[in-house]
Image (cartoon, rainbow, N blue to C red):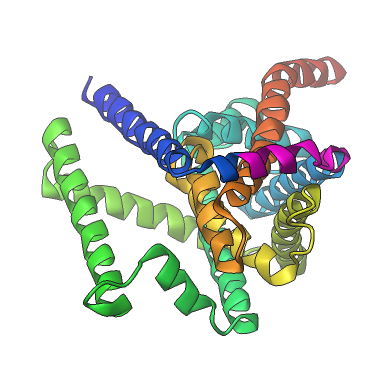
Amino acid sequence: MAKKITTLSQYAFFLGLGVFLIWWSLKGLTTEDRLQITHALERGRYWLIVPGIAINILSHWLRALRWRLIIQPLGYSPTRINTFFAVMIGYLANQAVPRLGEVLRCSTLTRYEKIPLDKLVGTVILERLVDTICLFAVFLLALAIQPDLYQNILSTFFPAKQGGNGLTLLFYIGLALLVVMVLTFLWMLITKKKFADLVAIFRKISLHIWQGFISIRALKKRWAFAFLSIAIWALYAASVYIGFLMLEETMHYGFKETLTVLCAGTLAMAATPGGIGAYAFLVQKTMTIYQLSTGLGLALGWLLWLLQVVVVLVVGGLSLLGLPLYNKYRQKLR
C-alpha cells in the first residue's frame, strides 16, 4: 500500500509540475505573441515531419542495438526486434510515470528473453550514465563554440538581483538540495523506512552500476558501442535541427543553437512525464538567448516535443501489440 501511495504521489507531483509549466508558459503570452504563433504555424513546412519521424525512430533503433551490446557480455543475446520493442515500451511507460519505463523495458525483455531482471537493471543504469556523459560532452561543446553561453544561461534562467548571478545560482542550488532532502524525508516517513534502508538502497544501486561497468569492460565491440553512442546523439541533434527548419522564423538557426536546445530538451524530458510542459518551457526560455520571441520559442518547443512524443506513442503502442505476435511466430519456427 505504501509503495502505491509513493508511486501515486510521485506521479501527481511530476504531472502537476508539467501542468504548472504549461500554465506558466502560456500566461505571459501577449496578443502579438499569439499572432506570431498563428502565422508561424500557418506557414510551417510540415513535410519535414516525415524525415523528423524517421530520424527519431532510427535513434531508438540504434539505442536498442547499443543496449544489446551491453547485455551480450553477460552471456545473453536477445533478438534485435525484442530489444527494440522493449525500449519503445519503456519510452511509452515514461510518458505516464517518469522512470517507470526503465523498469518496464527490463521486465519485458526478461519475460521474452529469459534474462535475469537484476542483470538488466544494471545495464540500464550504465546506459543512463553513458547518456549523462554524452549530454555533458554536448554541453561542453556548446560552451566551447559559444563563449558567452554560460553567462547568458545564468542571466536567462537565474536573473540577478542584488546579490548578483553567483549568489542567485547558489540560492537555487541550495533550494534544490533542500527540496530533495524534504522529499526524501517524506518518502521515508510514508514508507516507514529507516536510514539503514536508505543506505541499503544506495548499495543496491551501486551494485547494479558495478555490474554494468563489468559488462562495459567485457565488451568485444567497444568501437561499435562508441559509434552507436555518438550516432544516437547526432540523430537527437538532427531532430532538433529539423524542428528549426519547420518554421520560417527559425530556419536560420544552426549548429550552436541546436546543441543548446538539445541540452535543454534532454533535461526537460527527465523533469516531467514525457517532458510535458517542461520541454516547451525550457526550449522557449533557451531560445530567448538567441533573440527569438516568447511566442515563437513556445511554438518551436511544442513542435519539437510533439515530434518526439507522437513517435513514442505510435511506435510504442505498436510494440505492445507486436511483441507477443513476434514471439509467438518465433515459437512456431522452433
In the image, residue 68 above or below residue 274: below
Residue 250 seen in render: yes
The structure residue drawn at horizontal position 69% and vertical position 60%, both measured from the top left corner, is 233
Residue 228 is inside the magenta segment = no
Residue segment shown in magenta? 35-49
Residue 216: x and y in percent read 60, 63
Question: Residue 128 vs residue 60: left or right?
Answer: left
Residue 126 seen in render: no
Residue 144: x and y in percent read 61, 83
Q: Quadrant of the N terminus?
A: top left
Between 29 and 25, the one nearer to me in the picture: 29
Residue 107: x and y in percent read 53, 30
Question: Residue 9 vs residue 66: left or right?
Answer: left
Between 86 and 254, the one nearer to me in the picture: 254
Question: Residue 106 vs residue 235: left or right?
Answer: left
Q: Quadrant for residue 192, please give it.
A: top left
Q: Quadrant of the C terminus?
A: top right
Q: How many marks?
A: 0
Between 100 and 331, the one nearer to me in the picture: 100
Question: Residue 1 vs residue 160: left or right?
Answer: left
Residue 120: x and y in percent read 54, 43
Q: Quadrant for residue 303, please give it.
A: top right
In the image, residue 199 above or below residue 330: below
Please, what is the dominant secondary structure of the magenta stretch? helix
The structure residue drawn at horizontal position 46% and vertical position 41%, both measured from the top left corner, is 118
The structure residue drawn at horizontal position 65% and vertical position 47%, both measured from the top left corner, is 300
In the image, residue 201 above or below residue 190: below
In the image, residue 179 above or below residue 287: above
Q: Quadrant for residue 80, please give it.
A: top right
